[in-house]
Image: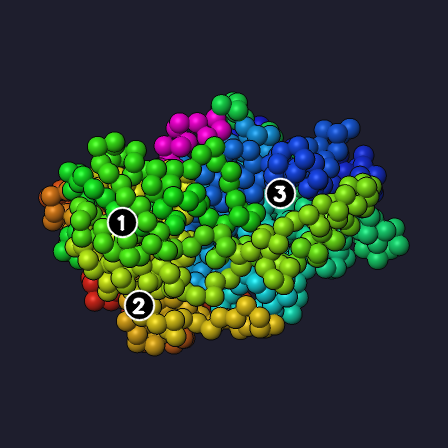
Amino acid sequence: MFHKESKCTLSRSEIEQRANAALQQMSLKEKVWLLNGNFDVLTYTIKYGNNYNPIPIATNGLKRLGISPIKFSDGPRGVVMGKSTCFPVSMARGASFDRSLEKRIGEVIGKEVRAQGGNYFGGVCVNLLRHPAWGRGQETYGEDPFLLGEMGKNLAEGVQEHNVMACVKHYAVNNIENSRFFVNIKADDRVMHEVYLPHFKKIIQAGAASVMGSYNLYMGEQACESRKLLTEILRDAWGFEGFTISDFFFGIRDGKKAIEAGLDVEMPTPLEYQRKLLKAVQEGKVAENVIDQAALRVMRTLLVFENTPDPMSYGKELIACPEHIALAQEAAEKSMVLLKNQGQVLPFSKKVKRVLLLGKLASRENTGDHGSSRVYAPYVTTPLQGLKSYLGQDVEIITYDETQIPAAKKMAGKVDCVIIIAGDDFNDEGEFVGSLGDLVNKIDTGYKNMGQSFKGFLTKIAAKLITASSLKADGTFLGGDRHDLSLKTDQRNLIQEIGSINPNTVVCLVCGSMIMLNDWGDKVPAVLYSWYAGMEGGLALARILFGDVNPSGKLPFTIPTSPDQLPYFSSTDPEITYDLYHGYTLLDKNGLKPAYPFGFGLSYTSYGYSDLHVEKNDNNLEVTVKVTNWGSRDGEEVVQVYVGMENSQVERQEKLLKGFEKVVISAGSEAEVKISIPLDELCYYNEWGKNWLLEPGTYLVMVGPSSDAHVLLKTSITLPVE
């Protein structure tokens, strides 16, 4: 189970025996009480000054039988508990296209969860970026299912190396934020299995211990109450053996329906389970064996992880230790995407004496959303601090913000270089919590069901003290879906007024998703996606701008020339239908050229591709290509493989990413890159037979530095009927 068979000290039969033996000794109430969390916002706030997840959010467990609680920590940019290492957001790490880096990040997260008493990481977020207006896009890896699956798989594997149960979320079709509590997503089975589910499947079959359901409805049912999602697909088709949990507070609306559909644990507090569930069983409305099944799934999973020897000890000195912080900096450096570098403006000369740094975000700690994914790092290096540290006291750094354009304009021509920091923060994009009143009522009910009514009363009193600055006019929290895919007006004005004055000017985009360049990009010679780059993002940025690091990130999404090229998006529609197309596949279908294609990213060197060769070897396509570093600098290149099919008998996307590899190539050197693609990746989902079919015929294999058809080497291979 969970790919721990070779290390776990218990055999599968012993795990089964122990779990069933414990079950036989448990009362009905004890079994039901295993299946909910005990969220304690009042204690969190008073004791820790953090109202969400400063310590593990724990279920009950059962001490008398030695059954441990599930001890939950959120993510994914690090461990949200304590003062943990803050990594770049997942979208940035998706831009790295670096599997091994993501696995190392997973290992650090696993270590820091354990060091803070946790055993469960709820931060493997792989919801697809269907549209960049989605407010929570920063928590996932991009628009492509293959990229999501590969990165999420490595994060989960890294976390579980340290016997922390990894949870993949939010299952499924959770791709809109403001309407997530009510929107019904419709999609046929082929769309689901080929576009919105394959990354979940890959991570689950790689051994992920747990799955979190989502808030939205799928085909008219709450996702956390969908038997099709939770049992027919997850368990029957994919063979999942772990346990499922609900998304928090609003995930379950009908406890009977949820538990019977296959939703095992209600998090983070007892609302529809516990007392309601106990009563339902006692009244014969829910069969006791349904409770038994959920309890067994939890106990089996705990037994596997608790009986697998730890590879190390987990002292608190691990939390945000120098080694972990260094990895956060490395991740930031390998994630940044050089989008534009007209006239080879970058890297800037290290001989600069005066630097003009513009934008309010230059001096602000800005690591991303302030919702459930927020990590409270021990410190954050801002762009200003990073440049000061890097350049030293002999270099003058002059700062102005968007309200000081006339002064900045006078100075722009008198300095060696101009660095403009623009983009978003937690006010512009992030998790949408909804109404404060609705949330407080849920917390109050949870406290009452835990027998702590007075805490619920105090929470209601405390909620009245929340300042209006923390809420929107309608009483909802800040964040949510984006209203504008470009920069703010004052940022655009700054760039348009100053961007073309000094030939050594760069705009650095601090963000968690796609930002349109169509109304300002031509005003500056250089643009760099620097992302919400984690606790050492400021230093990483300086090292990129001044050439210590050769940028190697690639866009994990498409930047269109107009928002009209994106799929339909609404934060208010009660129902939306998804199809096969979004991102680069939609532009391909419509014959449109993007402003910047998926997978695009420049370097301080240049690469050439040649000698593409493809052959079938057993159940794989073996792709070989030569990549030459033509420049005078060492670099890392992301070699991408796309596959399409000629004259298919079924509707297909023109091409899909099916392989990639990040390779280090020394200056002037050549590397032979080999990428293996399982034939299963080329199959399409047959809705009538509910199976996967490999269609015989001619497949077009394309290899290159991005999804742009004009830069891809192409060859074809015919796959006969097996």
Question: In the rendered image, which residue does mark 3 sit on?
Answer: 52
Q: Are marks 2 and 3 in contact (CB under 8 Å)?
A: no
Instruction: Check residue 419 in the rendering and tell me which mark sits there, or answer none.
Output: 1
* Kind of residue sitting beneath label 2: Asn
Residue at the image point whose x is 56% and y is 43% from the top? 74
Residue in the foreground of this view, choosing between 108 and 135:
135
Question: Residue type at mark 3?
Answer: Tyr
Relative to 131, 618 lies left or right: left
Q: Earlier in the sequence, mark 1 or mark 3?
A: 3
The tag earlier along the polypeptide, 2 or 3, is 3
Give the magenta part as a residue range.
318-334
Query: Magenta span: helix, strand or loop, mainly?
Result: helix
User: Which residue is found at the position 60% from the left and 30% from the top?
Assistant: 117
x then y, percent, for residue 523: 24, 63
The quadrant of the image that shows the C terminus is: bottom left
Quadrant of residue 43 in the image?
A: top right
Query: Is residue 330 one of those drawn in magenta?
Result: yes
Secondary structure at badge 2 equals: loop
Residue 537 appears in the picture as rendered:
no
Residue where numbered disc 2 is placed: 518
Give the residue type at disc 1: Ile
Structural distance between the alpha carbons of marks 1 and 2: 20 Å
Q: CA distance from mark 2 to mark 3?
A: 39 Å
